[in-house]
Image (cartoon, helix red, strand yellow):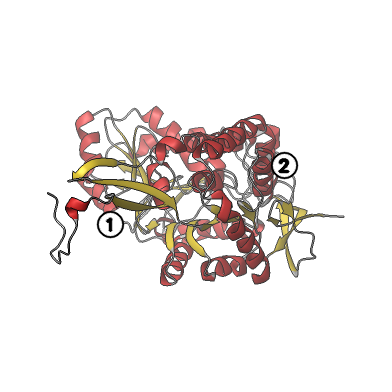
């Protein structure tokens, strides 16, 4: 019998028979590996009710006790990181080394949240006015909804959940239905770490579960990562119902290569950042902007490296795995046809690639286009697959114009040996995360992750200081103890004296 992945509510699996289920595939074979319960509105109601009940005591739990749970969770996550990486590879398809890297980056965010006693420290001003003291505190917002995507089934929940819990909130997590097992595994580690039942709940499903979280009046804040159209829907729906929302959307990440760049380093970076995780990363480089005259040499070096990539089952030590589903593979493959029809030069065709994996796997090999125009769909759309486009521009100013005209502003990189050019680029480019000779500039856990323009809806970036701010509300308390010398009625506006 095929295993059924169930909801995790109030510290245990929900044994009720689901009204609807979905299929979870092994992307390297194409076989149905598991089924997953799809939540009805009533399931979301149960999870939110459990979170609301747990909030009554968790928000008042001391920082010392909260941090003890966080430290224990961090140790368990570190101890079981190989097992978690194997779960990710089995359902997402990314190679084991990539899955291990995802878990490690999530672990770093859990480590950051362990410092919550310091992160929540308020301010105090003694005698701000005569015999009047003022202090500030940060308090939890309440029940939080986290909606995470398929491409990072462990890391993205670990961007949000540790900080939210550390700040005294309770959480309902809705992972992607495409690779849901990692969320349940992480929930089990939290319970083993001593997290009280109901503080973290996991509901699985599709749009029904998402919309139920957005509509629920008890849910006060929502964190989301996904495509731009859905991020816009989540932001507008959630804020329209009075919720605090951070919604990270899509991307079209550019890598600018200047004439003075080390082209071997740039080619290595373009291949690594373009085809890691089969291009299913919001920080993947999908557009290389080659500044004349480096185009021919750079494209040749990229193609040379692509020819050496081994595509196959991520459990077999291959370089690149399959895409997550057949439907997604077919969608990405359709862009190869569209690029050819638009007149781009297909340098490397990933269709029909020879693979080390099952014949029914969701395969598409690394694909490279040259002489891509900004009006072509392979440039304008977020493909989210192993398709790399090379645009050619005459100079630095033209490169900046290409980037700043793009509606996305998630991540970018510049490859150059000129400190002046790099500094100018960092100042002028309208993108939220910038790398200098670093192709995937994902910030470390004590900074914050997030883009500009259509890559982010809301004011708060993910994790780091922005995460703590998002999951708390500031309260300022002004105190004066009774003093007969300050008695009497005074209708004037209070002043500091």
Q: Residue at x 70, y 51 (%)?
A: 11
Q: Residues within 10 Å of mark 2 (few under 14, many from 20)?
A: many
Foreground residue among 8 and 89: 8
Determine if residue 207 is in view.
Answer: yes
User: Residue 208 at what x, y percent from top left?
Assistant: 61, 70
- Residue 209 disc label: none
Foreground residue among 13 and 438: 13
Determine if residue 444 is in view.
Answer: no
Which residue reaches farthest right? Answer: 1
- Identify the secondary structure beneath mark 2: loop
User: Residue 272 at what x, y percent from top left?
Assistant: 49, 36
Question: Looking at the image, is 21 positioned above or below residue 270?
Answer: below
Q: Which residue is mark 1?
A: 405
Left or right: 107 in relation to 134: right
Q: Which residue is mark 2?
A: 357
Q: CA distance from mark 2 to mark 1?
A: 41 Å
Foreground residue among 218 and 357: 218
Q: Residue at x 38, y 47 (%)?
A: 466
Q: Nearer the viewer, mark 2 or mark 1?
A: 1
User: Residue 263 at what x, y percent from top left?
Assistant: 36, 30
- Identify the secondary structure beneath mark 1: helix
Which residue reaches farthest front? Answer: 484
Asked if marks 2 and 1 touch (Cβ < 8 Å), the reply is no
Q: Residue at x 27, y 30 (%)?
A: 260
Q: Residues within 10 Å of mark 1 (few under 14, many from 20)?
A: few
Q: Residue at x 26, y 50 (%)?
A: 480
Foreground residue among 117 and 440: 117
Q: Quadrant of the N terminus?
A: bottom right
Q: Earlier in the sequence, mark 2 or mark 1?
A: 2
Q: Tag count in the figure?
A: 2
Res 216 → quadrant: bottom right
User: Residue 83 at what x, y percent from top left?
Assistant: 70, 35
């Amino acid at each position: 019998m095929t295993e059924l992945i169930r909801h995790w509510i109030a510290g245990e699996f929900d044994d009720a028979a689901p009204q609807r289920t979905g299929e979870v595939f092994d992307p390297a074979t194409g076989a149905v590996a598991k089924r997953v319960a799809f939540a009805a509105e009533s399931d979301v109601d149960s999870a939110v009710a459990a979170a609301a009940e747990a909030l009554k005591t968790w928000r008042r739990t001391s920082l010392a006790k909260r941090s003890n749970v966080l430290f224990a969770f961090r140790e368990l996550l570190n101890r079981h990181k190989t097992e978690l990486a194997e779960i990710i590879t089995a359902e997402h398809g990314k190679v084991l080394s990539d899955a291990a890297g995802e878990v490690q980056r999530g672990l770093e965010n859990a480590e950051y949240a362990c410092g919550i006693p310091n992160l929540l420290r308020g301010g105090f001003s003694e005698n701000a006015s005569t015999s009047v003291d003022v202090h500030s505190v940060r308090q939890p917002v309440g029940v939080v909804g986290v909606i995470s995507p398929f491409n990072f089934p462990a890391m993205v929940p670990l961007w949000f959940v540790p900080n939210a819990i550390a700040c005294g909130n309770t959480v309902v997590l809705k992972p992607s239905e495409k690779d849901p097992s990692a969320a349940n595994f992480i929930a089990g580690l939290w319970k083993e770490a001593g997290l009280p039942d109901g503080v973290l709940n996991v509901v699985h499903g599709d749009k029904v579960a998402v919309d139920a979280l957005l509509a629920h009046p008890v849910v006060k804040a929502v964190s989301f990562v996904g495509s731009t159209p859905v991020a816009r829907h989540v932001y507008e729906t959630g804020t329209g119902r009075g919720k605090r929302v951070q919604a990270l959307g899509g991307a079209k990440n550019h890598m600018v290569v200047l004439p003075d760049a080390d082209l071997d380093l740039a080619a290595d970076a373009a291949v690594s950042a373009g085809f890691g995780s089969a291009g299913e990363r919001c920080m993947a480089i999908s557009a290389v902007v080659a500044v004349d005259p480096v185009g021919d040499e750079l494209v040749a070096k990229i193609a040379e490296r692509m020819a050496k990539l081994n595509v196959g089952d991520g459990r077999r030590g291959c370089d690149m795995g399959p895409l997550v589903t057949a439907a997604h593979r077919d969608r990405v493959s359709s862009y190869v046809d569209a690029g050819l029809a638009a007149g781009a030069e297909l340098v490397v065709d990933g269709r029909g690639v020879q693979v080390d994996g099952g014949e029914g796997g969701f395969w598409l090999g690394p694909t490279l286009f040259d002489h891509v125009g900004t009006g072509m769909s392979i440039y304008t759309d977020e493909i989210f697959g192993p398709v790399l486009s090379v645009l050619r521009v005459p100079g630095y100013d033209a490169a900046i114009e290409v980037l700043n005209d793009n509606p996305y502003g998630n991540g970018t990189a510049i490859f150059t040996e000129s400190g002046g050019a790099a500094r100018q680029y960092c100042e002028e480019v309208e993108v939220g995360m910038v790398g200098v000779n670093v192709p995937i500039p994902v910030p470390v856990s004590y900074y914050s992750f997030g883009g500009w323009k259509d890559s982010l809806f809301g004011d708060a970036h993910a994790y780091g200081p922005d995460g703590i701010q998002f999951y708390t509300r500031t309260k300022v308390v002004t105190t004066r103890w009774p003093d007969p010398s300050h008695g009497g009625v005074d209708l004037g506006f209070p002043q500091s004296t």
